[in-house]
Image (spheres, rainbow, N blue to C red):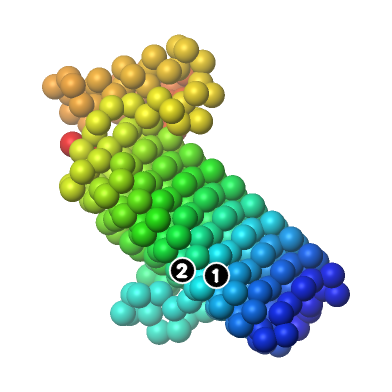
Amino acid sequence: MSISPLSRIAASSLVEAGAVIGAHVTVGPFCIISAGVVIGEGTVVGAFSVINGLTTIGRDNHFGQYASVGDVNQDLKYANEPTTLVIGDRNHIGKNSTIHRGTVEGLSTTVIGDDNHFLDSVHIGHDCIVGNGTRIGDNSGLAGHVELDDDAQIGYMCAVHQFCMLGSGVKILDQSAVVQDVPPFVMAGGNHAVPLGVNTQSRAFMALDKDQQDLVHELYERFYNQALSIEEVKRSLKVLESDFPVIGLYDRFFARSARGIVR
């Protein structure tokens, strides 16, 4: 066990031998930190939280009270293999949230990047890959093997089906159920979710120059308002790739997409 003398751990909390606690970490009352957990500098763990498994947490994260992090996943085939959970820096995880470690049938890890904001009672299933700067609303959940790219937004009380992929800058409206992949910058909603336009309020979209923003609108038209197949649209992306860097987001999306896109 390695506990920095600059950390603050409530007397009622249990830190098992084999855990590593960095400088300026705060662990609130009645928490359990298991062997194999590494918590980076400046992270705050709220009261009654449990962090276990082979979980590595970066710097300056905040976990609300009653969070369950790195716990056994819900895959019935899981047999306590040494799978992992990796969380980056500056994430805010709301109270009552659950984040599960990976499975050997999947990636053997669940990965969360930097600067994400998960509100209360959010669930992140096993083998999910979450990028940077995403936001997930209260009582929403990602099933296993979901990929959430940078700057994606999910409203409250939403459900994302296993193996779905949500591209960069996507916005899912409140109380929606997503059962297919959502291309970059698409706004979708409903049960089942359908496309509702371009998410022009995305930080990733607003960072584009006007020519690339216009191209995103044009691609939306090709996906949803013209009688073009996905393969035809993908071929047209190749022609544009050298002139517009944003095309790289679409290329990476379609290279991984396997469930078909929302319609």
Residue at mark 1: 65
Tell me what residue is drawn at x 77 percent, y 73 percent: 8
Residue at mark 2: 96
Residue at mark 2 to residue at mark 1: CA–CA distance: 6 Å
The x, y position of residue 54, in whole percent, is 58, 75
The x, y position of residue 212, in whole percent, is 45, 17
Could you tell which of marks 2 and 1 lies nearer the N-terminus?
A: 1
- Residue 209 or residue 249, whichever sits in front: 209
**Helix, strand or loop at disc 1?**
loop
- Residue 255 or residue 17, whichever sits in front: 17
Q: Are marks 2 and 1 in contact (CB under 8 Å)?
A: yes
Could one spot residue 231 in this view of the protein?
A: no
The x, y position of residue 86, in whole percent, is 57, 63
**Helix, strand or loop at disc 2?**
loop
- The residue sitting at the right extreme is 5
Q: Residues within 10 Å of mark 1 (few under 14, many from 20)?
A: many
State which quadrant residue 19 falls in. Answer: bottom right
Could one spot residue 17 in this view of the protein?
A: yes
The amino acid type, in three-letter code, at marker 2 is Asn
State which quadrant residue 139 falls in. Answer: bottom left
Tell me what residue is drawn at x 49 percent, y 45 percent: 134
The answer to whether 165 is drawn above or below residue 205 in the figure is below
